């Protein structure tokens, strides 16, 4: 993390940088954070840092931890499971709507996303795989034609990204996630609304089982 040049949106930029560090795992669960350290890192005053930290608290990424001050919120298996319950419902609804009015332009974009996803899996670079996976699901939200689905999901995706970064390993990349994505796209392209919904919901539920199981191991090792 490098210092920022002074700009009116400094608090937003500090927020985004700290959020990225938390969700990518650079800032570990339970890590202590101070205004002074962040202000020095980014080369800004304490005021934008304070505003950023207040927002991160409201969003659930930071907590007050008594004498330790402010810390990165610990990961929680039950919270992760709840996130995936919500995601499964939203993904299923988005896929059903997308299948009902899928266009040739969407076909092309979807296939491009599949190609990108398979390429990044071959690199074994977990952060890139996570980014490609999120892009695929955001595409389905957009294809649904209902902007409220994406807006509702947005508040949860950074928490999901955090779970994925903590729980995924190169070994997990061998799971046929992109085969499942391709199956979802085939259902969308064929206009199979019920099949697309079932596949998308089932995909989210399967990932919930894989990632929460792995997260339990990660948390137990850190305890």
Image: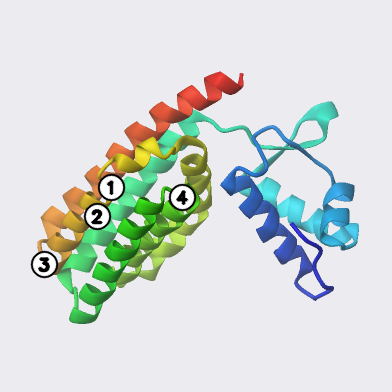
Q: Are marks 2 and 1 in contact (CB under 8 Å)?
A: yes
**Depth check: 157 or 168 in front?**
168
Say which of marks 2 and 3 sits in front. Answer: 2
**Label ID, residue 177:** 1
Residue pictured at 51% horizontal, 26% vertical:
218
Q: Is residue 29 left or right of residue 98?
A: right
C-alpha gap between disc 4 and disc 2:
19 Å
Q: Quadrant of residue 190?
A: bottom left
- Alpha-carbon neighbours of circle 4 within 10 Å: few (<14), some, or many (≥20)? few
Task: Find disc 2 in the rendering and name its residue.
Answer: 181
C-alpha gap between disc 1 and disc 4:
15 Å
Q: Position of residue 180 (x, y in %)?
A: 22, 50
C-alpha gap between disc 2 and disc 3:
15 Å
Say which of marks 4 and 3 sits in front. Answer: 4
Q: SS at mark 4?
A: loop
The C terminus appears in which quarter of the rendering? top right
Q: Is residue 90 left or right of residue 164?
A: left
Disc nearer the start of the sequence (2/3): 2
Task: Find disc 4 in the rendering and name its residue.
Answer: 125
C-alpha gap between disc 4 and disc 3:
33 Å
Q: SS at mark 3?
A: loop
- Alpha-carbon neighbours of circle 3 within 10 Å: few (<14), some, or many (≥20)? some
């Amino acid at each position: 993390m490098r210092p920022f040049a002074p700009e009116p949106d400094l608090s937003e930029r500090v927020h985004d940088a700290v959020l990225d560090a938390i969700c990518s795992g650079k800032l570990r669960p339970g890590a202590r954070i101070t205004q002074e350290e962040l202000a020095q890192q980014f080369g800004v005053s304490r005021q934008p840092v304070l505003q950023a930290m207040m927002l991160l608290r409201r969003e659930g990424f930071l907590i007050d931890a008594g004498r330790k001050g402010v810390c990165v919120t610990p990961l929680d298996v039950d919270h992760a499971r709840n996130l995936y319950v919500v995601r499964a419902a939203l993904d299923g609804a988005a896929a059903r709507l997308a299948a009902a009015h899928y266009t040739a332009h969407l076909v092309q974009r979807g296939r491009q996303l599949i190609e990108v996803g398979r390429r990044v899996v071959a690199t074994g670079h977990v952060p890139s795989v996570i980014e490609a996976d999120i892009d695929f699901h955001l595409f389905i939200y957009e294809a649904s034609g209902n902007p409220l689905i994406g807006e509702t999901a947005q508040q949860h995706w950074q928490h999901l990204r955090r779970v994925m970064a903590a729980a995924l390993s190169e070994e997990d990349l061998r799971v046929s996630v992109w085969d499942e994505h391709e199956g979802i796209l085939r259902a969308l392209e064929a206009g199979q609304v019920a099949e697309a919904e079932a596949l998308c919901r089932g995909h989210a539920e399967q990932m919930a089982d894989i990632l929460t199981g792995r997260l339990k191991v990660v948390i137990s090792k850190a305890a």
